[in-house]
Image: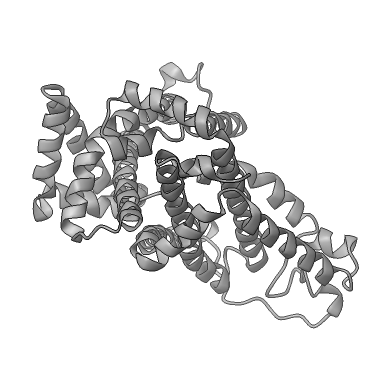
């Protein structure tokens, strides 16, 4: 932002902003999938639960990390405490109206815009891939969901077991056992954050610290698998909720949730593939680096780990984008995975043009949102009160954008299935 302010005279900046806004509106109202985007907006207006559910999940995660920051502030030694600043001073120098100064309430470094623009493509593409897989991280609400599942809240546990047995036959018991183990790990995951301080406070032996260091990531990985399954289940529910708007169906929340659980047993086929790839390329290397026998293969080097993690995220994102309609096909048609893959190939062959436009527009929106989010967070500061408040507010804005594009994707997919997309004049 500072780079923008120094490169462009302040008199011309409003005209550039107006031109960019005009170009965006022209693109939004003249693209081939504008009807689906419009219907997606109408859908979330009719069913606010589409964005409220995503917002609650994101807000809960932000609130948990804020509480964790407060806990670390009270539990850690002085030199390790996280920083808290109520407010930075205001500024009055007109020269710094856009990027502020280091002592001001708002401050961006000279290359903040360039850095945010360079760092945002991968998170933006991950958000786009989330529309076709799992749109939101569900921790820590997944821990509560795991507990409710274990106690058979409103009979949903029994519905899940019947669906798994019907879909996978004898193998369904093995899948069920895996879900229960991951649910137990999800319930225990919040305690992992406090375990190091508890071990130190109780005078724990080095063996206890080593045990937590090596096996804590295993429990976190199992908990992550349940969080992912919960996120996929939530997305299945939201897809079906959008579909009820498309078809004008009436429903009750409890029956739609049970229906989503039953359809989720078919989506689980694809989810298992994604979980296998994610575990093999992301989770397992992070676990094995903590064991001496595997450190020659997975050295504990921060820069190397970060590079491998970014590469794995990029490859997994590309994989999800390559097979983008598999999940929604399984949700609507309850087919075998092999047949869903063939359907996906036919979908891309017939509707590459409108689907390509949807990908472009979804990527553009998430990319711009990611840049704006990063700039505001950096400008306010992560350690200030307003910065922390922004961290709690931005999940609701992201939820609105994600719900709109997810509903638009459902509308586009059904429009393609009915043949209406082929009649669009491009």
**Compared with residue 2, is residue 106 higher up or lower down, i.e. above or below?**
below
Residue 182 visible, this angle: no
Horizontally, residue 32 falls left or right of residue 228, namely right
Q: Nearer the viewer, residue 25 or 123?
A: 25
Image quadrant where one finds the N terminus: bottom right
The residue positioned 37% from the left and 59% from the top of the image is 50
**Compared with residue 66, is residue 223 higher up or lower down, i.e. above or below?**
above
**Compared with residue 323, is residue 387 higher up or lower down, i.e. above or below?**
below
The residue positioned 8% from the left and 51% from the top of the image is 155
Horizontally, residue 230 falls left or right of residue 117, namely left
Q: Nearer the viewer, residue 259 or 1?
A: 259
Horizontally, residue 102 falls left or right of residue 163, namely right
Residue 3 visible, this angle: yes
Horizontally, residue 139 falls left or right of residue 415, namely left
- Farthest-out residue, bottom: 92
Q: Position of residue 416 (x, y in %)?
A: 45, 41
Q: Nearer the viewer, residue 59 or 24?
A: 24
Q: Position of residue 358 (x, y in %)?
A: 56, 45
Q: Nearer the viewer, residue 415 or 396?
A: 415
The residue positioned 10% from the left and 37% from the top of the image is 162
The residue positioned 18% from the left and 61% from the top of the image is 252
* Residue 34 falls in image quadrant: bottom right
Image quadrant where one finds the C terminus: top right
């Amino acid at each position: 932002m500072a780079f923008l302010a120094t490169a462009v005279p302040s008199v011309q900046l409003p005209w550039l902003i107006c031109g960019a806004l005009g170009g965006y509106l022209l693109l939004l109202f003249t693209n081939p999938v504008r009807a689906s985007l419009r219907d997606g907006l109408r859908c979330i207006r009719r069913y606010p639960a589409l964005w409220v559910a995503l917002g609650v999940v994101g807000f809960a995660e932000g609130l948990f990390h804020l509480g964790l920051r407060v806990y670390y502030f009270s539990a850690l030694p002085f030199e390790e405490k996280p920083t808290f600043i109520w407010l930075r001073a205001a500024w009055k120098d007109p020269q710094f109206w856009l990027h502020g100064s280091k002592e001001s309430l708002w401050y961006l470094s000279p290359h903040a815009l360039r850095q945010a623009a360079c760092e945002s493509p991968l998170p933006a593409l991950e958000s786009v891939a989330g529309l076709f897989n799992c749109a939101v991280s569900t921790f820590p609400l997944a821990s509560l969901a795991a507990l409710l599942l274990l106690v058979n809240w409103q009979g949903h546990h029994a519905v899940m077991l019947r669906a798994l047995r019907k879909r996978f036959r004898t193998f369904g018991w093995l899948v069920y056992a895996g879900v229960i183990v991951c649910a137990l790990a999800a319930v225990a995951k919040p305690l992992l954050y406090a375990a190091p301080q508890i071990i130190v406070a109780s005078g724990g032996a080095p063996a206890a610290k080593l045990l937590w260091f090596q096996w804590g990531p295993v429990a976190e990985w199992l908990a992550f698998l349940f969080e992912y399954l919960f996120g996929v289940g939530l997305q299945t529910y939201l897809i079906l909720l959008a579909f009820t708007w498309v078809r004008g169906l009436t429903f009750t929340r409890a029956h739609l949730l049970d229906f989503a659980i039953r359809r989720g047993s078919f989506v689980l086929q694809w989810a298992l593939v994604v979980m296998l790839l994610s575990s093999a390329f992301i989770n397992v290397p992070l676990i094995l680096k903590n064991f001496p026998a595997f450190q020659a293969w997975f050295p504990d080097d921060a820069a190397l780990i970060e590079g491998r993690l970014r590469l794995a995220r990029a490859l997994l994102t590309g994989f999800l984008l390559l097979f983008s309609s598999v999940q929604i096909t399984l949700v609507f048609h309850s087919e075998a995975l092999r047949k869903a893959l063939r359907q996906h190939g036919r979908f891309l062959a017939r509707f590459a043009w409108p689907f390509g436009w949807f990908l472009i527009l979804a990527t553009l929106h998430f990319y711009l949102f990611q840049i704006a989010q990063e700039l505001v967070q950096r400008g306010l500061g992560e350690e200030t009160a307003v910065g922390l408040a922004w961290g709690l507010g931005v999940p609701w804005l992201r939820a609105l954008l994600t719900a709109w594009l997810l509903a638009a994707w459902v509308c586009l997919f059904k429009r393609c299935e009915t043949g209406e997309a082929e009649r669009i004049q491009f």
